Amino acid sequence: MASVDGLVTGMSTSSTVAQLMQVEALPQTALKNKVTAENKAVTGLQAVNAKMSALITATKALSEPGSWTGVKATSSSDAAVVTALPGAQPGSFSFAVESLATTHTATFTGGSVSSASDAALAPVLDNGVTFDIRLADGSTKTLTPTNGSLNSVAAAINGEADSMFKAAAVQVAPGQYTLQLTAKSSGAAAAFSNDVDGDWTNDLSGALTGLSVALGTPNLTAQGVDAQLRVGTDSPTETSYVITSASNTFTEVQTGLTVTATKKTDPGAPVTISLASDPEDLATKVATMVEAANVALSEIATQMKAKSGTTAGGALVGESALRKLSQDILSTVSGGAPNLGPNNTVGTFNSVGITVDRGGKLKFDKAEFLKSYTADPVKTQAYFDSHKEVAHPKASATKFDPGWDQAQGIALKLLTVGLQASEGVKLPTDPANKLPEGTLPGLVKRRNAAIKTLNNQVSAWDVRLDLRKAALEKQFSSLETAMGKMQQQSSWLASQLAGLG
């Protein structure tokens, strides 16, 4: 509706309507402020949840099977690189690198072409001529190259997925090109021929009409062989034995141990592999767990911080679930380790270097941890990954069930707290179709539902306010019209009175 905007009354109608609408919109503004606050709360909950997920990851590094069996592997020679995986056991052994793996290669010799790509001036096949190649299963397959050039022959071979080899046009001298065939992987099993003068040569060169004339015949360039390690000594004896591998990498030489050979060893200079427990790595894992717990505590404190003067407060001030979560994290240390102290009393985690400082943060003393681990590795481990099994027909009797079994070690305690907060814990008594839900995702879900309801209310207010604005504009327009008529009547009366005089 067009605004008269005070042409008669002199009053700014549009400004007046705008001011009145600000008052009318106060309930909607309050709803919008609630939406903003709820969105900040959701962001805050998600930030805390991310920190709890990081804590879960850190605790698993100290609570899952094999976490405490890690060893550090060293090699006495650059002839072999060694990697220890979970499950490797402390110890040592020696071996000699007798041979490295090679890839089988055959090259056509006795002839060449002046160009690898020119099918007209330097063909190896007549156009339209087919040829057969040996497949991995021993059979042959007929191929038809795009043209008779060397590159087309190589491309046709490489386009066959089941071929035993791959092909390449190689330059053997300036302006002289020939065909080279290379097994698709190293080792003896991948060798496509051990006798280049046998049936393989006759099959291939005979099928490649004209190729043997242009390029000669295929000859062995490199024999495909396996890599070999001789364990025990560096020469054959009754007690030594050989390990073979198609590549230079030997997996599971011992449980969890991988060896990669880089060169042959000299006689009398075997490689000695040493595997020893790595307390420094364990200390790093403990420090990472403690730091993750402190980061989570800091995030909770930030989100719950009360407003102070001009400093804004957190988005989750007064959220009881976060207060409980903070207390749960700290109580994992203050509650001690049941049955791990002297005479099965409650042990203190100070024994393995973990305490709570006056500022409400976890503190890790690496030296105290290493001292404990050196004195008694088994008991030190128990301070982190032990639990009391709670019998139940549906519970696992071999692994820890969070929220069901009673965690005693701090890693399992923090894991339980983290899972309950972030991912949720599925109890043995829960129905099979029930999905676990963490406390934090549950709060996010409920707040998102509230945000949706609030936004619907905001939208409803938009309609209501549009109608109210239209009504006000109509009222003021009617007022202007009425005042205009009154002025006209007043002027007419004035003119009539003036005529009577």
Image: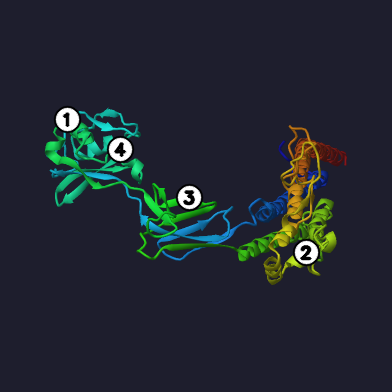
- Calculate the distance from the C-alpha at mark 4 to the C-alpha at mark 2: 63 Å
SS class, disc 1: loop
- Type of residue at label 3? Thr
Residue that carries the numbered disc 3 in the rendered image: 251
Q: How many marks?
A: 4
- Type of residue at label 4? Asn
Residues marked 4 and 2 touching at CB (< 8 Å)? no
* Coloration of the structure image: rainbow
Query: For the residues carrying marks 4 and 2, which lies nearer the camera in this image?
Result: 2
Query: For the residues carrying marks 3 and 2, which lies nearer the camera in this image?
Result: 3
Name the disc covering residue 148, or none.
none
Residues marked 1 and 2 touching at CB (< 8 Å)? no
Residue that carries the numbered disc 2 in the rendered image: 349
Please provide percent x and percent y for residue 172: 17, 50
Q: Nearer the viewer, residue 480 or 136?
A: 136
Residue that carries the numbered disc 1 in the rendered image: 127
Query: For the residues carrying marks 4 and 1, which lies nearer the camera in this image?
Result: 4
Name the disc covering residue 158, or none.
4
Q: Is residue 296 visible?
A: no
Could you tell me which residue is drawn at 76 percent across and 35 percent down?
463
Q: Nearer the viewer, residue 462 or 36?
A: 36
Residues marked 3 and 4 touching at CB (< 8 Å)? no
